[in-house]
Image (cartoon, grey):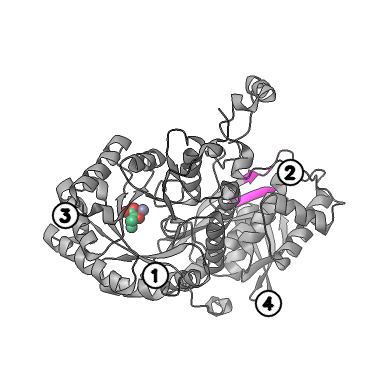
Amino acid sequence: MSNDNQSSVSSNRDRVIIFDTTLRDGEQSPGATMTFEEKLEVADLLDALGVDVIEAGFPIASEGDFEAVSAIARRVKRATVAGLARAAFKDIDRCAEAVKHAVRPRIHTFISTSPLHMKYKLQKEPAEVLEMVTAQVTRARNYVEDVEWSAEDGTRTDIDFLCRTVEAAIKAGATTINIPDTVGYTVPEEYERIFRTVRERVPNSDKAVFSVHCHNDLGLAVANTLAGLAGGARQIECTINGIGERAGNAALEEVVMALRTRADVLPYSNNIETSMLTRASKLVSAVTSFPVQYNKAIVGRNAFAHESGIHQDGMLKNALTYEIMTPESVGVSKTSLVMGKHSGRNAFRTKLKEMGYELGENSLEDAFNRFKALADKKKIVYDEDIEALVDDEIGHAGERIKVEALTVIAGTMGPQTATLTLNIDGQSQTKQAVGNGPVDAIFNAIKALVPNEATLELYQVHAVTEGTDAQAEVSVRLSENGRSVTAKGADPDTLVASARAYVAALNKLMVKRLKGKPEPMTARLKP
Ligand code: KIV
Ligand code: ZN
């Protein structure tokens, strides 16, 4: 046995289509908002990663969503670009408009089919829903040849009715049929059976590709996904890091590495370049500010770490003892360059490349300057330090409000006072505020400079590495009118990191509020 079973993948395997919905279902999860530029960056990486379909967004949802889907459709050259549409003509028309410039456009339309959803959510009779399936798929097919239809809450749908809706969708021209486990309720045996039954019973079921879409409410999303394949599905809907509504969706990296590592029992092939998985995970974590849990399969910090003596001993004798896949196969490389205050620009650039980052010239220059400042303060600059710094740089690129300077008076004598200078749309503005502790004082100073109604939902600090000179990484979640965003800030000074994180969240909230209609930030500021 090898710990890298890719070599055993033969050509007579069934090809499965990898449909990534990080930019749609993933971005829909509370706090995971991405800016327009971040969405383009993620789309570029997904295309390079080798996903077959990129679900780029929900065009009718907002002007910003429409613009993002449309821009992604224009720039992605390899993958199919899909947009989501509810069962309404206006949704489908808008979606068609957004994806029309894609080399391979897809319209993905859906309607609920379960008794619960039809009765309470749609307030429609099954017969009406059936008619809508035909009407919407027909409408979509007038625009594009590639139409996906989803039976929302499919796993809680009466199987006879599910078959009738699938039959109607195929008859109307749907080329992909998705049976989502919308609420993460199914179990593997059941999900497999649903696909088998529908494929057996529905006339012309071979005219469409069947698709799995699993949510992780019971932690079964990946297992259910694999079971769906056993039932005959050949498209997998998933997201990077498993982000998505509630407990998330099936994680792309977990599904793909399961297929690769257990190729002996999972006879399917796909086009994913697995050595880019770590990079994809880091990018999505950086732009959403959703941390990847340490013990997360495949891309967690500890996924390839061996701490116990017994394990370390085994690893030294033969890595196969405790590793079922190589770190290199998912893009975790043992980097060769040790960085310190004498390292130059070129070494820094090479190091970033080794770590899987590719920055534009401006971001690279900014990151390098911050690295130099850090190396002056810190004895050893670890890879994790560089990672935090670059993620911070990516997360803050293009922001309209920036932290320029901060002085804080803290300690037992109180009142804790923060004097903060923000650069807002190119203009420096300073305010002083007091608070119940230094962080509160900083946040009050920010509020004084950028008046807002946002509620602080989360404030979290973690040390990037060990030691008292470690960089702090702060996460802040703000919410306003039911919408929430999360952002991170990193700095050796916890208070500066806090200010950066809060300001980053505010920037995201503004973008979300404006949704693609740029307006000078200062216009929103009260005098
Ligand atoms: O979970 C779900 O049902 C969905 C559909 C829109 C496909 O995301
Ligand atoms: Zn979903």
Which mark is first along the chain, 1 or 3? 1
Q: Which residue is mark 2?
A: 335
Q: Nearer the viewer, residue 373 or 198?
A: 198
- Real-space Cα distance between discs 1 and 4? 34 Å
Kind of residue sitting beneath label 1: Pro
How many other residues sit within 10 Å of disc 1, few (<14), some (14-19) or many (≥20)? many
Is tag 1's residue or tag 4's residue first in the polypeptide sequence?
A: 1
Mark 3: amino acid = Arg
Quarter of the displayed picture in which ligand 1 can be seen: bottom left
User: Mark 1 — residue?
Assistant: 59
Residues at marks 4 and 3, CA–CA distance in whole angstroms: 61 Å
Residue assigned mark 3: 164
Mark 4 / mark 2, whichever is N-terminal = 2
On the image, numbered disc 4 is attached to which residue? 427
**Residue drawn at 80 percent across, 47 percent down:** 339
Q: Which residues are magenta?
A: 462-475
Q: Is disc 3 in contact with disc 1, using a CB cutoff of under 8 Å? A: no
The reply to whether the C-beta atoms of the residues labelled 4 and 3 are less than 8 Å apart is no
Q: Earlier in the sequence, mark 3 or mark 2?
A: 3
Label 3: state its secondary structure.
helix
Q: Nearer the viewer, mark 1 or mark 4?
A: 1
